[in-house]
Image (spheres, rainbow, N blue to C red):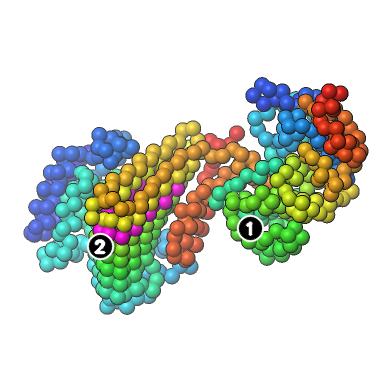
């Protein structure tokens, strides 16, 4: 699904990722944990295609050179990132945005575009599952949404777009326990042998709800340690400091 | 540039007072010439240079009758009354949805020639705002004279079509539109503009609206068709007590368009709302100037102007709220927000408050910003192309102005025209 080899990324001449390697197979869930400033969000941004980074190394996504693809093509080909800080976009109606996004992606994937009625039925089911108040669909995109509503809106977009590779960038931050459960259920409902997840988080608690196959510890732009789910628990006890010393 | 005033004067003599008014006003115009940046209210638009560069052969149209308009230019699936002007000349009017005995409609040329009727509009010729007003008084040939009786609400909107065909090429077209709305009456006016085959002309129009007590006049000025025309539209509004004037401006089609709207609140509890959008690309230059004059207590005014500038275009908003000493409890609000898409586009804003009363609520704000790259990234990460993302952001940004429209059918019409207009934008300078 995803093979990252010796990936380096700098912004404003500051090197953030320093030879990062990772391989994700279809159906796997990988968690990346690490202290502030270790490069977690940079990794997510580089994979999604955000401008402004000088990038070296190789990223193969479904066998293709991901770094060469424009942002929208990455999304159309099934890459989805749930933003740590979803943007508030004034004037853009949430419902219109979701419909345009879905139909653009469906068109590229060779599927029939949904008419308003089909879309309405789809969105009704999805919002109900995620316990999202349908009213937010008629509001401006993320404008005035609570932290929880913004994150749920990201998960809503994820479930609608049915991506192949999902990156969750600190989706748990700012969520209360109830919202975290709902978000996790949304993610778990999408678990599939053909779909992979890359979960970026500070804390172990999200991993109580979404069980990863692998946990990687990112320190100073590189993976310092890889393990199974228990590694997260261990980290919670000893903190990142010790890992940095070892790394 | 030879405007051939003498020839015009000879051909349009009425034997009445108007003849002298024309001569006097043409003199006034000649002393000042076309407005240039030396004048405060034209500091962002050098009209003189603009006309000399683009319309150096500008002339006054002769009296030859011009043709009709094409039916395909009329609004479809939208029930309305209509007045058709071609090259500034009154061609026809139909009020199919109304009680005709409540409405007095005449081509302005008829009023100009008739001594008795002329007295009704004589005071319009006193207005001496700038040299273009003088020029309009001197050279006005036709336009609209519309009087609506008291206690009459229109059933459907009135659309005033302004068509310009090749007879207008290199012409300066001066007309006036006079609308008087009686007490407790209500009228919605849409003004649409369309020019044939990208011809060049200069249109100088003065609108006079008189809104009596408790009456409601809504004006929607839709300049959405791309053309090579140069336009100055001046609107003078007299609002009496408890009346409402609502104006929406869609400023997007012409090479040059300056709208100047003066609202005089002449009775307590009168209100005026002047909102609009400016959407420009290529080398277009549009300007909006509003001037709200609070003279009595408890009046309300508000302006929301949203602008999007692409390519090498430039836009300007000059807004003034003036509150006289007697106008206590005034509620005034003004906001201009502009979004710049290109390094070569510019937006100028000049908000002004002049307040002499001590118990008022007035606020104004103005922001100009570049398009937010973070928002573009967010939308593209959901599969939208850069073009789609730009369009979605522009539509969203300008929609806030469209949302101020209080008539649901007209809002939907203007919303559709805006989407169509945004879809026509090429975004050439924006693609990397």
At 55% across and 37% down in the image, what residue appears? B430
Q: Nearer the viewer, residue B156 or A167?
A: A167
Q: Chain of mark 2?
A: B
Residue plotted at (16% across, 58% down): B123
* Left-right relation of B133 to B308: left
Residues under labels 2 and 1: Cα distance? 43 Å
Query: Which chain does the residue under circle 1 lie in?
Result: A
Residue highlighted by disc 1: A136
Picture coordinates of residue A229, whole percent (x, y): 90, 40
x%, y% of residue B236?
26, 55
Mark 2 element type: loop
Residue A165 location (% of width, % of height): 80, 43
Task: Write the start and end of the magenta stretch as one range.
Answer: B286-306
The residue identified by callout 2 is B267
Same-chain status of marks 2 and 1 = no
Q: Residue at x 72, y 35 (%)?
A: A41
Q: Is residue B151 above or below residue A241?
A: below
């Amino acid at each position: 699904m995803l093979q990252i080899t010796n990936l380096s990324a700098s912004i404003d001449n500051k090197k953030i990722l320093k030879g990062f390697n990772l391989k994700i197979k279809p159906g796997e869930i990988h968690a990346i944990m690490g202290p502030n400033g270790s490069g977690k969000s940079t990794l997510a941004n580089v994979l999604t295609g955000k401008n402004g980074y000088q990038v070296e190394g190789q990223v193969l996504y479904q066998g293709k050179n991901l770094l060469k693809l424009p942002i929208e093509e990455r999304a159309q080909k099934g890459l989805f990132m749930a933003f740590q800080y979803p943007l508030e976009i004034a004037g853009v109606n949430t419902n219109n945005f979701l419909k345009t996004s879905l139909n653009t992606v469906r068109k590229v994937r060779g599927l029939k575009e949904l008419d308003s009625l089909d879309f309405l039925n789809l969105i009704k089911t999805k919002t109900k599952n995620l316990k999202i108040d349908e009213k937010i669909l008629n509001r401006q995109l993320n404008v005035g949404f609570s932290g929880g509503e913004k994150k749920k809106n990201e998960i809503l977009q994820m479930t609608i777009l049915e991506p192949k590779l999902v990156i969750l960038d600190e989706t748990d931050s700012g969520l209360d326990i109830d919202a975290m459960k709902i978000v996790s259920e949304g993610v778990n409902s999408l678990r599939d042998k053909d779909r992979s997840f890359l979960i970026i988080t500070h804390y172990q608690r999200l991993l109580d709800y979404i069980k990863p196959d692998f946990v990687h510890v990112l320190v100073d732009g590189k993976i310092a340690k890889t393990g199974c789910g228990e590694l997260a628990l261990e980290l919670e006890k000893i903190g990142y400091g010790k890992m940095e010393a070892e790394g | 540039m030879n405007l051939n005033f003498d020839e015009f004067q000879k051909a349009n003599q009425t034997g009445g007072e108007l003849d002298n008014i024309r001569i006097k006003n043409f003199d006034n115009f000649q002393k000042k010439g076309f407005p240039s940046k030396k004048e405060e209210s034209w500091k962002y638009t050098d009209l003189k240079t603009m006309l000399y560069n683009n319309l150096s052969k500008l002339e006054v149209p002769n009296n030859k009758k011009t043709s009709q308009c094409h039916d395909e230019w009329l609004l479809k699936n939208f029930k309305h009354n209509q007045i058709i002007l071609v090259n500034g000349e009154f061609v026809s009017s139909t009020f199919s949805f109304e009680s005709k005995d409540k409405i007095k409609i005449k081509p302005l040329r008829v009023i100009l020639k008739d001594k008795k009727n002329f007295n009704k509009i004589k005071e319009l010729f006193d207005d001496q705002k700038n040299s273009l007003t003088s020029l309009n008084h001197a050279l006005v040939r036709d336009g609209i004279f519309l009087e609506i009786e008291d206690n009459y609400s229109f059933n459907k909107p009135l659309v005033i079509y302004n068509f310009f065909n090749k007879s207008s090429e290199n012409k300066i077209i001066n007309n006036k539109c006079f609308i008087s709305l009686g007490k407790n009456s209500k009228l919605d006016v849409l003004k649409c503009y369309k020019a044939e085959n990208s011809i060049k002309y200069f249109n100088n129009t003065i609108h006079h609206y008189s809104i009596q007590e408790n009456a409601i006049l809504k004006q929607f000025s839709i300049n959405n068709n791309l053309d090579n025309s140069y336009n100055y539209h001046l609107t003078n509004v007299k609002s009496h007590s408890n009346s409402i004037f609502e104006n929406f401006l869609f400023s997007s089609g012409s090479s040059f368009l300056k709208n100047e709207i003066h609202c005089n609140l002449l009775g307590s509890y009168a209100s005026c709302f002047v909102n609009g959008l400016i959407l420009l690309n290529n080398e277009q230059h549009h300007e909006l100037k509003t001037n709200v004059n609070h003279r009595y207590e408890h009046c309300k005014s508000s302006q929301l102007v949203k602008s999007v500038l692409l390519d090498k275009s430039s836009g300007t908003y000059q807004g003034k709220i003036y509150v006289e000493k007697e106008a206590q409890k005034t509620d005034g609000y003004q906001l201009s927000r502009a979004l710049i898409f290109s390094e070569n586009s510019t937006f100028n804003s000049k908000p002004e408050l002049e307040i002499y009363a001590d118990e008022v609520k007035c606020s104004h704000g103005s922001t100009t910003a570049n398009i937010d790259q973070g928002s573009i990234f967010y939308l593209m990460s959901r599969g939208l192309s850069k073009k789609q993302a730009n369009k979605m952001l522009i539509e969203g940004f300008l929609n806030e102005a469209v949302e101020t429209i209080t008539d649901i059918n007209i809002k939907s019409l203007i919303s559709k025209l805006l989407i169509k207009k945004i879809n026509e934008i090429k975004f050439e300078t924006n693609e990397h």
